[in-house]
Image (cartoon, grey):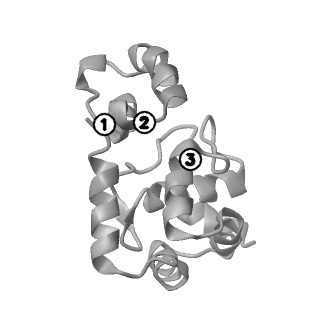
């Protein structure tokens, strides 16, 4: 691992949140955020953010068929955003453009009431505590964007 090069690419997640889950990389939502978290994790500057396991990341790994550890190993080479984009496109099992568009739209539009019961129960206390104002949270990705000041 080229630590200096990786540091030049990484966000210090102790000070700045990762990119919004809405931002795409390799054509997929969530991916840019996972790249930020992988870089920070490799450098020990991830703060409260987990690369793996990660509930949000699980949606991405499951849909794409990508292996989180293989992705992290690739990121450790000092891969740029462009190189990570190409790696995701090459290695994801899903190649159908319309299937990817549909999944992205489903994720962006995923309502809290459509989440698993245990996630809804968790968010019932999490959102009022960390998302100000909680009334801004309408969709799953809003939890991250409101808490991190994007929305």
Residue under label 1, please give it. 111
The answer to whether any part of residue 133 appears in the image is no
- x 35%, y 41%: residue: 141
The image quarter containing residue 8 is: bottom right
Front residue (pair 98, 12): 98
Sooner in the amino-acid sequence: mark 3 or mark 2: 3
Q: Residues within 10 Å of mark 1 (few under 14, many from 20)?
A: some
Left or right: where does residue 68 sit relative to residue 123? Answer: right
CA gap between label 1 and label 3 equals 30 Å
Left or right: where does residue 32 sit relative to residue 75? Answer: left
Sooner in the amino-acid sequence: mark 1 or mark 3: 3
Query: What is the x, y in percent for residue 36?
Result: 53, 56
Q: Is the residue under label 2 in contact with that under label 1 (CB below 8 Å)?
A: yes
Q: Is residue 145 above or below residue 81?
A: above
Which image quadrant: the N terminus?
bottom right
Residue under label 2, please give it. 115
Residue under label 3, please give it. 12
- Kindly give the residue lying farthest to the bottom in the view shown: 90
Query: What is the x, y in percent for residue 24?
Result: 35, 63
Circle count: 3
Q: Mark 3 or mark 2: which is in front?
A: 2
């Amino acid at each position: 691992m080229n630590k200096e090069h990786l540091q030049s690419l990484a966000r210090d997640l102790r000070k700045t949140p990762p990119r919004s889950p809405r931002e795409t990389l390799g054509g997929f939502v969530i991916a840019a955020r996972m790249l930020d978290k992988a870089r920070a994790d490799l450098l020990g500057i991830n703060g409260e953010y987990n690369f793996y396991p990660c509930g949000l990341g699980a949606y991405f790994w499951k849909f794409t068929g990508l292996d989180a550890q293989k992705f992290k190993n690739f990121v450790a080479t000092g891969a740029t955003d462009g190189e990570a984009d190409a790696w995701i496109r090459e290695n994801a099992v899903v190649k159908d453009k319309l299937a990817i568009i549909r999944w992205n739209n489903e994720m962006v539009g995923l309502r809290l009431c459509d989440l698993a019961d245990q996630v809804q129960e968790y968010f019932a206390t999490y959102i009022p505590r960390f998302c100000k104002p909680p009334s801004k949270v309408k969709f799953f990705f809003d939890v991250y964007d409101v808490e991190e000041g994007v929305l």
